Amino acid sequence: MPNYYQPEIETASREQILAWQNERLVKQVQHVWDNVPYYRAKMEERGLTPADIQSVEDLHKLPFLTKADLRDAYPYGLLGKPLSECVRIQSTSGTTGRRVVAFYTQHDIDLWEDCCARAIVAAGGTKEDVVQVAYGYGLFTGGPGLNGGSHRVGCLTLPMSSGNTERQLQFMTDLETTILCCTPSYAAYLGESIAEAGLRDKIKLKAGIFGAEAWSEEMRRDIEQSLGIKAYDIYGLTETSGPGVAYECSEQSGMHINEDHFLAEIIDPDTGEVLPEGSKGELVFTALTKEAFPLLRYRTRDICVLTRKPCSCGRTHVKMSKPMGRSDDMLIIKGVNVFPSQIETVLLEQGYPANYQIIVDRVNHSDTLEVMVEMSPEKFSDSLADIHEEEKKLVAALKTMLGIYAKVRIVSPKSITRSEGKAVRIIDKRKI
Amino acid sequence: MNIHQISIFLENRAGQLAQVTRVLADHGIDMRAISIAETSDYGVLRMIVDDAEKATAILLENGYILSMTPVTVIAVPDQAGGLAPVLEALAEGNMDVEYMYSLFTHKEGMAYMVFRIADEEKFAELLAAHGVILADKEELGLK
C-alpha cells in the first residue's frame, strides 16, 4: 500500500498539476519582475514583460540563469524578499571560489521541508519511525533539509550530522534507527563498519534516503544488502532549496520531481533549445513557489532524462533519471561541489604553476581527491622540510577553498601532460 | 670552501634517478658525492660533481629544477672515532647540522665529509678552533 505525505498533490491529475504550474508561473514571473531587478533587466533585454508569460507554454521565452549569474549577483542580487523577511541561508561552493548563498523565508523553509517529508514517506516513513540524519548540518542543505522533513512526518529525528562512525552506530543500535539519511558513500561505509563490528543483528534499519552524490545501481545493491534495507535516491540543489526537489518512490526507477514547486525542462546544453520529453539533456528548474530566492530557468548542468510514464506508486509527478553527467566541469566529491577553477585559483595564489591534474577516485566506497601539481623553481628548496611546509600550506588553502581534504602530490616540472588543445585536468576513476 | 652542492627535485618513482645520472654521464660529469632525502612522493638529490657550473647548465637544459647550496667539506681520519669529535664540537657550539654525507673520494688515511650548516662562518671558526682540516677543491678534483 503506497504512502503519501500530501496525497492530493502527489497523485493529482496531470491537468491539475499543469493548472497549478500555469497559475504559479504567472505569479512568480510577476514577483521576480517586481522584486529582482537583476532578472528584470535580463527580461527587458529580450523585450519581455510579465504579460508575455501567460502559461507554461511561454516558459521557453524567459532567459536562463546560470552559476555565473549567481556569482555576478552575489550576495543579494537575486533576492526576491527584503532581508527582514528572510530567516535562513544555506550555501554551497560556486565557481572560482565564490560561494552560492541561497535565502529562505519561513514559507520557503516550510515548502522545502514538505518536499523532504514527501521523500521520507515515499521511502516508507511514518511517525513511528526513527530517522537518523547523517548528512552534514550547517551550510550544507542535506542535514537541515531531511531534519525538517523528518519533523514534519513526526518521526523521532536523530540530528547526527556526518562522521563519527562509532557514535552513529551506537545511536543506530541503541535507539533502533529505522531510516538512515546520508550520502551513499557514507551509507556503504556504515554498512562495512556494521559488518566489521558484528552489529548486523542489532540493526533495525528498513530504508535509507541517500543523495548529494552520484551512485550506481551496483552501489545501491551493495548498500541494500549490507544494511538490509531499501535504498532510495534523493535529488536537489542549494540553488532551488536543497534535497527533496526530486525523490524516489517504491518503484526505484527515477525520482519524482515535486512539480507543484519546481518546473522542469530538458534543454540542449549547447543551444539552449528545449528538447522533447524522453530526450537526454540538461535539466533546468524554475522555482514556482520560492519567495526569497525565486530562480527562473536555472541551469543545473546536470544531464538527465525526464519521463511522464505512469508510475506504479500512483504518483503523477514527472520522473527524472539519475544525473548521467554534467554539462560543465563541476565534480561532486563526498557530496561537495568542486570546480577545477577553484583549485586553479588556489594554486596561482600559492605561487604554483597552473598546470595541474585532479584525480578523483573511490576507495572503499569513499571519494578521494588528489591534486597533482608541478614543482616550480620558486617553490623548490634544498631543504625537504621547507618543501613539506609549503605543501602543508597548499593543503590548508585547498581545504579552506573546497571544504574537503585534498591530497597534494608534487611532481616533476613539465611532467603533467600538456596535450594539444584542451589539457586533461580531471581524471575521474570512479565507476559510477 | 667555496664548494657548491647541486640539489635537484626528483619525483619518487622508478627511473627518476636513472634518468638524471644518465644525463650527467652523457656529458662526462663525474659525481663525487650523492645523498638523497626523500618522502613517499618526492625527494631532493644532493650531489657534489667535478664541474658544478657545467652540470647546472646541462640539468637546467634538461628541465630539472635545482638549486646551488654552499657546503663545507672537511677531511677526518678514516678510522674509528674520526668523525665523532667534530660532531661533538658542533654540539658544544650549539650548531645544528642540517644534513651531512660522505664523499666517494678518499685520501691516504682520510675520509671526506660534506656538511650543510646554516651559519657557515661560525662553522669555519669552530672548525679552525678544533684544528679540523678543510678540503679544498683541488684535492677533491673539483673545478
Image: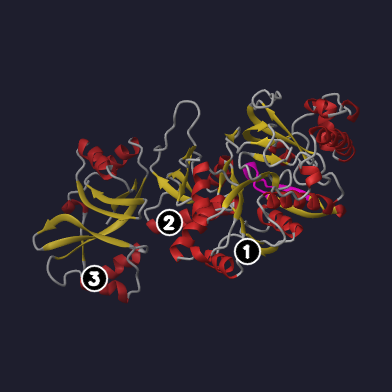
Which residue of the protein is positioned furthest toward the bottom in this rendering? B92
Taking the magenta stretch, the answer to whether it contains residue A110 is no
Mark 2 and mark 1 lie on one chain; the one further toward the N terminus is: 1
Query: Vertical placement of B125 versus A316: above or below?
Result: below
Q: Which residue is mark 2?
A: A388
Q: For the N terminus of chain B, which image quadrant?
A: bottom left
Identity, as a three-letter code, of the amino acid under mark 2 = His
Left or right for A92, reference A10: left
Host chain of mark 2 = A
Which mark lies nearer to you, 3 or 2? 2
Residue A175 vs residue A276, the one in the foreground? A175
Q: Which residue is mark 3?
A: B86
Identity, as a three-letter code, of the amino acid under mark 3 = Val
Which mark lies nearer to you, 2 or 1? 1
Host chain of mark 1 = A
Coloration mode? secondary structure
Give percent across and percent down for residue A148: 73, 57
Which mark lies nearer to you, 1 or 3? 1
Give percent across and percent down for residue A376: 43, 44
Query: Vertical placement of A293 versus A110: above or below?
Result: above
Q: Which stretch is magenta?
A: A92-103
* C-alpha distance separating marks 3 and 2: 30 Å
The residue under the point 81% across, 49% down is A108
Query: Vertical placement of B134 versus A431: above or below?
Result: below
Host chain of mark 3 = B
Identity, as a three-letter code, of the amino acid under mark 1 = Met
* C-alpha distance separating marks 1 and 3: 60 Å
Left or right for A265, reference A108: left
Q: Which residue is mark 1?
A: A160
Residue B40 vs residue A175, the one in the foreground? A175
Judge if badges 3 and 2 mark residues of a common chain.
Answer: no
